[in-house]
Image: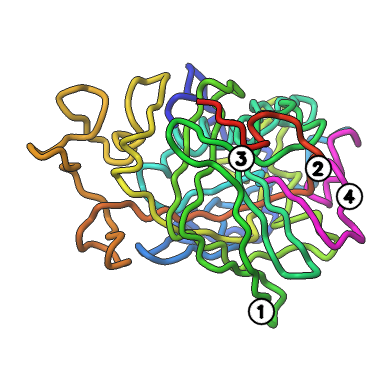
Amino acid sequence: MVALVGGLGLAAAACSSKEAAAPAPSDENAYENDCAVQIGGFPKATCDKSPRLCDTPPTCSLPTTCGNVSQCLNTVDNAGKTKVALRVRRLAVAAPESLTIPLVQRTILNKAMDFASPTCGERGDGSFNWILEVDLATNKLKTGGAAPADAAGAGGYCFVNTKLNGFDVAPINVNLTKSAEGLYTTETVPVLNVPIFVQGKRDNVIILPLREVTVKDVALSANGNCIGSYRAGGLTTDLDCRENISDCPKWLTGGSLAGYIKLSDADKIDIIDIGKTLCTVLTNKTGPDGKSCPKTATGEIDVKGDYCSTTKSAGGCQDSFWLAATLAASATELQANPTDPFCTGTPTN
């Protein structure tokens, strides 16, 4: 994932004009552990570990072309539909620690999920498109990564269905259960490979190889336009209407997910721009080749994770890392009859 860094700077300045959207605790760090998660567990779906110092009222206003602020900046209206599609707008990683650092979360993941639309407070590249299609009539979910599309989100998406870098990448269909509180939870998905097309380039893809993944406690809005919510006070004129993520993230999450990444899978995933594998990013360890994780004399990964794929528990064989995150999403458009080779099962490499 570090491939997306590309010399980007972080907007780290805090705004003096901020007021708390809700009464702030006297201890600025009181929210630090709001998204804490144990290995093998899930973070709270609605967690927010920021101090919540939002502009109230918002100091930045968005044109109507950006979507409805109260409807998560939706690009289409799902109201009245029995099958609704949403694009993940924020994936807030809670574990492993190596993916929670600002370099990964802010400069890489957030940038890849934000659109290239500065007038809407979005200065990303739209290269990470994770789609959730919920069938409300049958309580089923279809989810997976979408092929590169318009960087501003126009024209709709199609699910990738092909082989990429040796991995089968395709959407999965899974049953949903709905709690008495109206929250959706999926069955456990054995394998879900989600592609990130670095800067939207089709020949530079990173696979997020999730195993035994479950999406949990998803709060889908009544009109089907939101998971979580958009907080307009997260944009501030002090930063040229950029997000001040340290004080007030613009997306409040409304669902959680968790699964594991096997180190053996991660070591097969080349991050072209840094010339190393995903395994080295997860472990911060590099073997003598300078590219992949250290190996034993028999070729086994010689570095430990925090989770065991065979016992499905923390520790143990330590052949994996537990990945847990929360998410926010907004209504989007799926193409009815895609012709993109990435979406039609045509092998690409």
Please give the name of the residue rendered at 30% of the width and 52% of the height, measured from the top-left corner: 320
Viewer-side residue, 25 vs 323 = 323
Please give the name of the residue rendered at 45% of the width and 53% of the height, measured from the top-left corner: 94
* Residue 35 in view: no
Please tell me whether residue 279 belongs to the stretch shown in magenta.
no
Whether label 1 touches label 3, CB < 8 Å: no
Q: Nearer the viewer, mark 1 or mark 2?
A: 2
Question: Residue 307 placed where, x, y %?
Answer: 29, 58
Query: Does residue 123 lie above or below 67 as drawn?
Result: above
* Residue 307 in view: yes
Viewer-side residue, 194 vs 218 = 194
Which numbered tag is attached to residue 179?
A: 1
Whether label 2 touches label 3, CB < 8 Å: no
Residue holding disc 2: 333
**Residue with the most extreme top position:** 7
Real-space Cα separation, disc 2 to disc 3, in angstroms: 17 Å
Real-space Cα separation, disc 4 to disc 2, in angstroms: 9 Å
Real-space Cα separation, disc 1 to disc 4, in angstroms: 25 Å
Whether label 3 touches label 4, CB < 8 Å: no
Give the magenta part as a residue range: 64-87
Identify residue type, mark 1.
Ser
Question: Residue 46 placed where, x, y %?
Answer: 60, 62
